[in-house]
Image (cartoon, grey):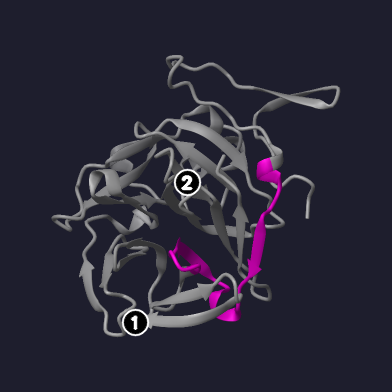
Amino acid sequence: MKNRLFKTISLCALLGAGVVTFTTAQNYSSDDRPTIAASTDDLARVMASWTLPAELREVSGIALLDDGLMACVQDEEGAIYLYDLEQKAVTGKIPFAGPGDYEGIVLHQNTAYILRSDGAVLEVKDFRSGKPAVTEHASILPISQNTEGLALDEKNNRLLIACKGYDEKFGPVKTIFALPLDSKQMQETPAIIIPLAQEQLKTTSGKKKDPYAVLQPSSLEIHPQTGELYLLDAVNHRLLVINEQGTIQKTVELDKDLFRQAEGLSFGPNGEMYIASEGSKKGSGVIVKYGKGI
């Protein structure tokens, strides 16, 4: 494992043994000017890691339960896997639908919500009862949006759905849509718009022919203590923090050797952070735990 799990994507100058980071000033006020996170001992140190069994090689979403279990979904099978972090084994499997491209999971009380890549959300009530009731909430999004991130916004009683893809009618942005938990109907207007012209996204723009490829969210989560929105980007190997206006506040690069394809993100009640990554065809999926976010 590398000495440092994350590395800054900002311009760095080495001064002796210290590292100083610089960001380019944009048209932001002093209160909302984005920053780029530097590597720290806390982020460089892995608290724990788990190598997942074969059925979770393509793990695509995770959500931590109170009893030390991690609820997981994977790309192909319509089932919730209960992975025991202490026993390091799958201890339960809850089918909820047929085969499909399932990308995210969140838990709210006794209900699990699972995101499909077409934007549909499957509501699995009493998912641990043995006889869960499943309701599908249809998507209003075009297939090009390719949804991969799902988060529970308890403050606003809604689900947030992050799009890996795009819809050209919104312009050069990535979008996050809301699905209120009272109506269960996705809103047509994006709840959050992330402009792609932000400075932190320009580092890879010269390498990508597609201007929309500089940001491809693969997971979305809300920090339980700060309320910040965390985005994983598996394609560009990044973890980002944004505010509700879509401004990038922090960003770090992920270690490609550890995270082949980071698709799952979850927080514990004290802010501890879990990142799940798919494995290669001959490899294994992993979950990695850190003491806090960035």
Mark 2, residues whose alpha carbon is within 10 Å: few (<14), some, or many (≥20)?
A: many
Point 48% across, 38% down: residue: 241
- Residue 24 is left or right of residue 69, and the answer is right
Q: Amino acid at mark 2?
A: Leu
| Most foreground residue, 149 or 199 | 149
Along the line of sight, the residue nearer the viewer: 141 or 161: 161
Classify mark 2: helix, strand or loop: strand
Decide whether residue 64 is among the magenta residues: yes
- In this rendering, the answer to whether 51 lies above or below 211 is below
* Location of residue 77 in the rendering, given as x and y in whole percent from the top left corner: 43, 78
Residue at image coords 68%, 26%: 11
**Residue 103 visible in rendering:** yes
Query: Measuring 59% from the left and 72% from the top, which residue is drawn there?
Result: 86
Q: Secondary structure at mark 1?
A: loop
Instruction: Quickly name the residue at label 2.
Output: 231
> Which mark lies nearer to you, 2 or 1?
2
Coordinates of residue 76 in the picture (x, y in percent): 44, 76
Q: Is residue 106 left or right of residue 217?
A: left
Q: Is residue 138 left or right of residue 118?
A: left
- Residue sticking out furthest to the right: 16
Residue 98, disc:
1
Q: Quadrant of the C terminus?
A: top right
* Magenta residue span: 42-69
Say whether disc 2 or disc 1 marks the residue closer to the N-terminus.
1
Q: Amino acid at mark 1?
A: Gly
